[in-house]
Image (cartoon, rainbow, N blue to C red):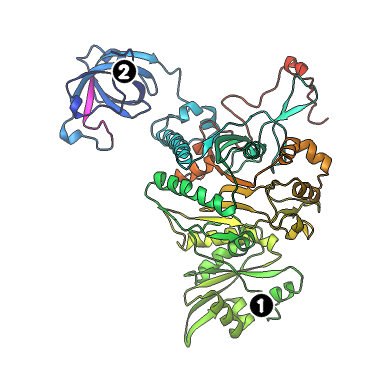
């Protein structure tokens, strides 16, 4: 017999009754029923109940074990009485009577957090003792889901004719939209490598090298501020690139992989097969977000014409300013003053003065509009708004006004809140949409022109398009949104040196800087580069959606905390003086 086990803790069933077996695992729970010990023994695979009484030679030793001790037991498989069968366990028909026990690993002192029971504990404690936290059933299941998702993605990509290649981890810095993690070079004092924010340049070079249909489960490193749906240091993505493709070809290749993945691991939740394409400007206008949650049917609308020159002075005067508008957020079934006041308070909590509203109710002469705005607008304009939005008795509409960039984010949050409050948002489903026609450039807070998305994207219209207003240039860039999260980002690449030089020049990069920072790729493009494009899917975020978690740290085995610290490994840590000397570095105090 194996030194530690003949079976796992999920393998035994009624057909093993009478057999002598050996099990090893963690003590999940101990119950002492007056001279009879019942212990749930847990391993990676499951749980088996073991029992021991005073007649067993192992009883004295087994009385001493506590939660999370690691033990090895020998015993006999016995059938449970029919009334004691536990249908929740795969081993629920049997128990093992213990005749011998060996302690393989005891616990010193008290556990900093319990494994049994899944109680809520402070995240700092959970991350400090992540090896204990990972023993919990929920987190363990999430990690197994993640493992199976990665395996499935690999299989699906191979089956779709893609090949997996690996790209370097130590490379050069490049502008990918976040800060680089720099790595000082010992052999080249004063120079630094960078950890890749993405394998962007390398996967394009793979296409130039004559390969096609590349994929990789790629680690990416970005020094970013943390969010609930984003790791502050590193993450994994399904990286994809294809040659001789247009935007639609990428969509056609990717959809079956992602759709199949969500059908496989979605636990019966509906997976939408119709993935609409929504222009970036329309996504902001209709949903207040470039990653809309289409489970919510609410679509916002511009109702500025109904307020221009109206009796509602606040909006009428506002609309005299260039670039302003009034946006309506319909709220079907939200037609009560109580609900409208609640949403008004929500807007104030978001930093706005409030949201105006109209709601429709039954009156003496039929349906009537109510609220201060309805009174100021008058019945004709109010009816025009109701007709445009297709609202009826018992419905409401909320209004936000100003420059769209100043209120769209809050409007998007309000739309989501209304959908949740009124139970309009579909549950137990995944709804996808492609966001297309992203602007190539944006104006920074300092008034400069910079790339708004991927700097290596092909502008729509090619070189000629770059002679116009940079803020009106669209790129062949696209995102895939799912349930309010960005799941995929990609583009058709700019593979022509003349267009690339001009595109970077508009963003303030002279030819010399492009050659210095992207010399390898620019050089390659001068030796015959195919049209190519691709995308990348965040694996952490996909698993978070499939696991129905709200925090991405629940699907990462060893995540950083909100301050980008690894509390378990004590990182980041201070280097030794010897390490600094080898690297020709000196650390300056914070106030220097």
Res. 263 mark: none
Comparing 47 with 201, the one in front is 201
**With 543 as the anchor, is 414 left or right in this view?**
right
Q: Picture coordinates of residue 265 (x, y %)?
A: 41, 44
Determine whether 73 is above or below 413 in the image.
Answer: above
Q: Position of residue 569 (x, y in %)?
A: 58, 24
Q: Residues within 10 Å of mark 1 (few under 14, many from 20)?
A: some
Disc 1, SS: helix
* Percent x, y of residue 214: 56, 39
Residue 1 placement: quadrant: top left
Disc 2 packing (10 Å; few <14; some 14–19; many ≥20): some
| First to last magenta residue range | 89-97
Residue 5's mark?
Answer: 2
In the rendered structure, does residue 140 fall within the stretch colored magenta?
no
When the figure is inspected, residue 449 is found, relative to residue 399, above or below; the finding is: above
Residue located at (38% from left, 19% from top): 70
Note whether 361 is above or below 490 in the view shown: below
First in sequence, mark 1 or 2: give its number. 2
The quadrant holding residue 2 is top left
Residue annotated with mark 1: 305
Q: Give 301 or 589, whichever is nearer the viewer.
A: 301
Total numbered labels placed on residues in the image: 2
- Residue 91 magenta: yes
Is residue 268 visible in this depiction of the protein? yes
């Amino acid at each position: 017999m194996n030194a530690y086990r003949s079976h796992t803790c999920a393998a035994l069933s009624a057909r093993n009754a009478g057999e002598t077996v050996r099990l090893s695992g963690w003590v999940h729970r101990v119950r002492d029923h007056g001279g009879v010990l019942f212990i749930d023994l847990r391993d990676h695979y499951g749980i088996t109940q073991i029992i021991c009484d005073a007649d067993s030679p192992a009883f004295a030793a087994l009385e001493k074990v506590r939660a999370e001790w690691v033990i090895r037991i020998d015993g006999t498989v016995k059938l449970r009485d029919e009334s004691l069968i536990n249908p929740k366990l795969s081993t629920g028909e049997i128990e093992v009577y213990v005749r011998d026990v060996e302690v393989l690993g005891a616990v010193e002192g008290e556990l900093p957090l319990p494994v049994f029971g899944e109680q809520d504990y402070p995240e700092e404690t959970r991350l400090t003792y992540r090896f204990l936290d990972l023993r919990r059933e929920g987190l363990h299941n999430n990690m197994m889901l993640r493992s199976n998702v990665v395996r499935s993605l690999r299989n699906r990509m191979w089956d779709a004719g893609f090949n997996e290649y690996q790209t370097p981890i130590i490379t050069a810095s490049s502008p990918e939209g976040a800060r680089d993690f720099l790595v000082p070079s010992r052999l080249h004092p004063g120079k630094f490598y960078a950890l890749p924010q993405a394998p962007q340049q390398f996967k394009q070079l793979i296409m130039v090298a004559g390969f096609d249909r590349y994929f990789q489960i790629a680690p990416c490193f970005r020094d970013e501020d943390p969010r609930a749906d984003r790791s502050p240091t590193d993450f994994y993505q399904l990286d994809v690139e294809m040659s001789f493709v247009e935007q639609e070809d990428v969509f056609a290749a990717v959809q079956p992989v992602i759709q199949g993945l969500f059908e496989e691991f979605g636990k019966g939740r509906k997976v939408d097969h119709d993935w609409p394409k929504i222009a970036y400007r329309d996504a902001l206008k209709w949903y207040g977000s470039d990653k809309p949650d289409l489970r919510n049917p609410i679509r916002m609308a511009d109702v500025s014409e109904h307020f221009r020159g109206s009796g509602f002075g606040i909006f009428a005067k506002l609309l005299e300013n260039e670039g302003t508008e009034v946006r309506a957020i319909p709220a079907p079934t939200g037609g009560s003053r109580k609900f409208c006041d609640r949403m008004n308070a929500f807007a104030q909590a978001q930093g706005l003065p409030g949201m105006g509203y109209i709601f429709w109710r039954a009156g003496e002469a039929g349906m009537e509009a109510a609220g201060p705005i309805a009174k100021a607008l008058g019945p004709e304009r109010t009816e025009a708004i109701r007709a445009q939005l297709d609202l009826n008795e018992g419905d409401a509409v909320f209004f936000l006004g100003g420059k769209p960039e100043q209120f769209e984010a809050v409007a998007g949050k309000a739309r989501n809140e209304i959908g949740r409050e009124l139970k309009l948002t579909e549950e137990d489903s995944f709804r996808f949409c492609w966001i297309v026609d992203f602007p190539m450039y944006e104006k920074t807070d300092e008034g400069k022109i910079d790339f708004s998305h991927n700097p290596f994207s092909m502008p729509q219209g090619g070189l000629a398009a770059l002679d116009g207003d940079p803020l009106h240039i669209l790129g062949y860039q696209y995102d895939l949104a799912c349930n309010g999260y960005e799941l995929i980002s990609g583009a058709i690449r700019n593979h022509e040196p003349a267009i690339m030089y001009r595109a970077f020049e508009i963003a303030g990069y002279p030819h010399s800087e492009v050659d210095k920072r992207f010399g390898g790729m620019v050089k390659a493009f001068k030796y015959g580069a195919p049209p190519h494009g691709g995308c990348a899917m965040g694996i952490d975020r996909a698993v978070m959606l499939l696991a129905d978690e709200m925090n991405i740290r629940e699907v990462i085995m060893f995540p950083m905390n909100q301050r980008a610290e690894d509390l378990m490994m004590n990182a980041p840590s201070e280097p030794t003086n010897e390490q600094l000397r080898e690297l020709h570095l000196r650390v300056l105090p914070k106030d220097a």
